[in-house]
Image (spheres, rainbow, N blue to C red):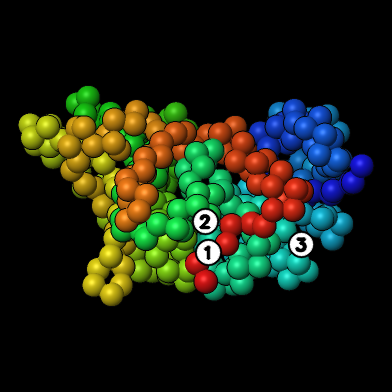
């Protein structure tokens, strides 16, 4: 039996579910010849109420990271997690992260580690719906043409409520009350969360050094009920769509409210779900759809990455 020590950064909804799912899958790791030991969980407030396995080592002191064989980061933010993860990566230890903002905006620091297979981040885009795995492996045999995707559940919810006649501000308030949107909600409704995810995806099919700044972003704040009704009259729906396609010798990456026909795969994938249509010259159009948010949905992808890591599979390698 091989012992693998794991450190966890962050213990919100995703972090708590990661800990509980690791406990639930303990027997599977044992079948793999691995005993996982959580040697520390970094939190801001030890006294906060949490649903975690008994004996979970919560702490505000990150010194436990020196003892970890691998580190899982689900704390969010950019510069703080980067400062904690950089020494781990430089010491050739693997990192599993769900942090799309960090990946999108600090790629200049992280790319060499991703190329080295030390960075695992399936959960960073579409949560538990596997898309980074296929794009980083089998889909590379097909020449990439285009993708369209809905990658933010908050915007999907707000627009679906507007289709029922609720004004934007009312739909946004309800989304915040349900915990779907942050306060302030700019990252979601402004399109930046979607743009982060699109930049991550672009590095597997367009350019391995694709820059977040190259994504044109327009959110849903200016979508009105009149816009919704005009689309409905034409047999269409408005979605916040991330698009990546060829533009001459380069690439056009855009996030914007877009009218799609009611029978478009993105519109038929189900309310509140993330969806992507990927087009390759040889593979043809492929549709991916599923839960794109939620504590346990995201945790399932995080724990899947942990399993890959302990089995010796490399992390998600972008285009060279």
| Vertical side of 98 occupied by 318: above or below | below
Relative placement, left or right, of 102 versus 182 is right
Mark 3 to mark 1 CA distance (whole Å): 18 Å
Q: Nearer the viewer, mark 3 or mark 2?
A: 2
- Secondary structure at numbered mark 2: loop
- Lower sequence index among marks 3 and 1: 3
Question: Residue beneath label 2, please?
Answer: 136
Asked where in the image residue 151 lies, by quadrant, the reply is top left
The answer to whether any part of residue 228 appears in the image is: no
Which comes before the other along the chain, label 1 or label 2? 2
Camera-near label (3 vs 1) is: 1
Disc 1, SS: loop
Using residue 251 as the reference point, say whether residue 319 is left or right of it: right
Q: Is residue 47 left or right of residue 228?
A: right
Residue 93's tag is: 3
Residue ranking furthest to the top = 164
- In space, the residues marked 1 and 2 are separated at their CA atoms by 7 Å
């Amino acid at each position: 039996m091989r012992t693998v020590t794991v450190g966890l950064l962050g213990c919100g909804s995703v972090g708590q579910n990661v800990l509980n799912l690791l406990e639930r899958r303990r027997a599977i790791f044992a079948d793999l010849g691995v005993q996982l030991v959580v040697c520390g969980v970094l939190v801001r407030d030890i006294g906060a109420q949490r649903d975690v396995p008994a004996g979970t080592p919560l702490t505000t002191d990150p010194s436990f990271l020196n003892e970890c064989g691998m580190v899982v980061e689900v704390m969010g933010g950019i510069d703080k997690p980067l400062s904690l993860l950089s020494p781990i990566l430089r010491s050739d230890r693997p990192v599993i992260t769900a942090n799309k903002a960090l990946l999108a905006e600090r790629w200049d620091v992280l790319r060499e580690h991703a190329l080295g297979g030390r960075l695992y981040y399936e959960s960073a885009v579409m949560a538990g719906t596997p898309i980074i795995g296929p794009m980083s492996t089998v889909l590379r045999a097909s020449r990439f043409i285009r993708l369209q995707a809905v990658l933010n559940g908050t915007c999907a919810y707000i627009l679906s409520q507007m289709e029922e006649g609720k004004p934007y501000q009312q739909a946004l308030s309800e989304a915040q009350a349900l915990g779907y949107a942050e306060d302030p909600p700019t990252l979601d409704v402004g399109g930046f969360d979607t743009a982060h995810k699109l930049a991550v995806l672009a590095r597997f099919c367009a350019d391995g050094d694709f820059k977040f700044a190259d994504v044109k972003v327009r959110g849903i704040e200016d979508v009105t009920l009149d816009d919704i009704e005009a689309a409905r009259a034409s047999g269409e729906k408005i979605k916040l769509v991330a698009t990546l396609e060829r533009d001459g010798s380069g690439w056009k990456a855009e996030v914007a409210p877009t009218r799609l026909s009611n029978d478009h795969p993105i519109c038929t994938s189900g309310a509140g779900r993330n969806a992507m249509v990927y087009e390759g010259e040889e593979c043809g159009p492929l549709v991916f759809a599923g839960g794109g948010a939620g504590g346990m949905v995201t945790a399932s992808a995080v724990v899947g990455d942990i399993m890959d890591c302990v089995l010796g599979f490399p992390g998600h390698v972008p285009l060279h």
